[in-house]
Image: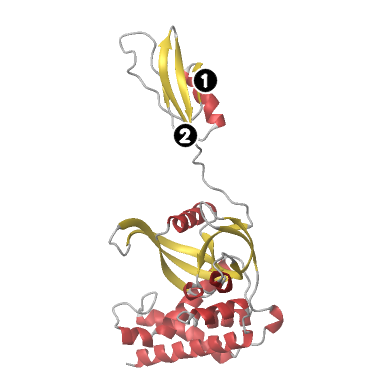
Amino acid sequence: MPHCRLPVSSLVLAAFFSEMTDSFVLNSLPATGPSAGRRPYTCRTASTRVTTRCCTGDSDEVSISLRPSKRENTLPSAAMPCISVLPDRLILPGQKKQIHVYDQNNIEVLNTAMRVKDGYLCHVVVDPAALAERRFALCEFGVLLKVLSTSPSIHRNKYGERSDSIRAEVAGLRRVRVHEVFQKEPFLAANTTDTVMITQGEDSQVDPSLLDALNNCKRLRSELSLDSRGEAGEGDERRAELQSVSVVEDACWICSLLEEEGQELTSTEKIGLFGLASLRDSDGSKKLETLMEPDCLSLVSAGEKIIRDANNQLSAMKSL
């Protein structure tokens, strides 16, 4: 740790280091008088500590200790903090989920996303083929996530040991192309660019009855006063019945979020997003296949089905 000793006044020293560093600590002790050594002046920074070593004459002689900077980690605009997952834990666009993060690197991903990326991070998929060869590589595509809320938690490992963790609700927004890894420590970050899953050329006229069914879902959810997932206080069987309802609710919310951010969605993209949301509980291979090579017609068909199923379920609940 470097040190230097300077006979300077406290105010001059404070002005100098306020320009050079994030913060510092200065203990300025009077050289003479009955209160010598009893009036510390303290300023703090993340990278510098200044403390008095001795006093002679009318000046303060101080020792300056420079600590490693703890300045907020910043990333280039194209580099996103990333959580790497296996395919079965992948969150696709249109899906909302609560995740429990207890690995220190991933905690830093969340913190960085909230601090410098407006709550955005990426879910990137570990390449299964590379993993089988015991090497690290990422799949070509990942998913941009938005952190909706976080809360502190506690994680217990298999030995019963406790450690701090974070529970976060996140939403999958859109597919991204993953380019080169920008860094692996202190957390994973990669350069990414947005990419669509359903192209404009595949847009088609949506059946008006489907839009009616979707609007009816929104109205019935409000009338029935269902919670945000349509599952509160229900048993496993009831939650299974309401799965289509919660899937549609999640996809509706994410469509609204995307539109608020200025993204114009075609009719086909909207319905396809519902189709992606319907894969929430699918196995990893199905999720990965859909992310890598999406079948647009199948996604739209799945979206239409989940909307009609939710409408039928809510209509039946209303009639009871």
Please tell me in which quadrant of the rendered image residue 150 appears.
bottom left
- Residue that carries the numbered disc 1 in the rendered image: 12
Q: Is residue 200 left or right of residue 32?
A: right
- Farthest top residue in view: 57
**Residue sitting nearer the eye, 125 or 246:** 125
Q: Position of residue 138 (x, y in %)?
A: 59, 67
**Residue sitting nearer the eye, 84 or 245:** 84
Is the residue marked by circle 2 packed among few (<14), some (14-19), or many (20+) residues within 10 Å? some
At numbered mark 1, what does the secondary structure look like: helix, strand or loop? Answer: helix
Disc 2 residue type? Thr
- Farthest front residue in view: 133
- Residue that carries the numbered disc 2 in the rendered image: 45
Look at the picture and state if 286 lies above or below 35. Answer: below
Q: Position of residue 303 (x, y in %)?
A: 54, 85
At numbered mark 2, what does the secondary structure look like: helix, strand or loop? Answer: loop
Look at the picture and state if 187 lies above or below 289. Answer: above
Sequence-first disc among 2 and 1:
1
**Residue sitting nearer the eye, 79 or 218:** 79
Is the residue marked by circle 1 packed among few (<14), some (14-19), or many (20+) residues within 10 Å? few
Distance CA(mark 2)–CA(mark 1): 16 Å
For the question of whether residue 274 can be seen, the reply is no
For the question of whether residue 31 can be seen, the reply is yes
Q: Position of residue 288 (x, y in %)?
A: 56, 77
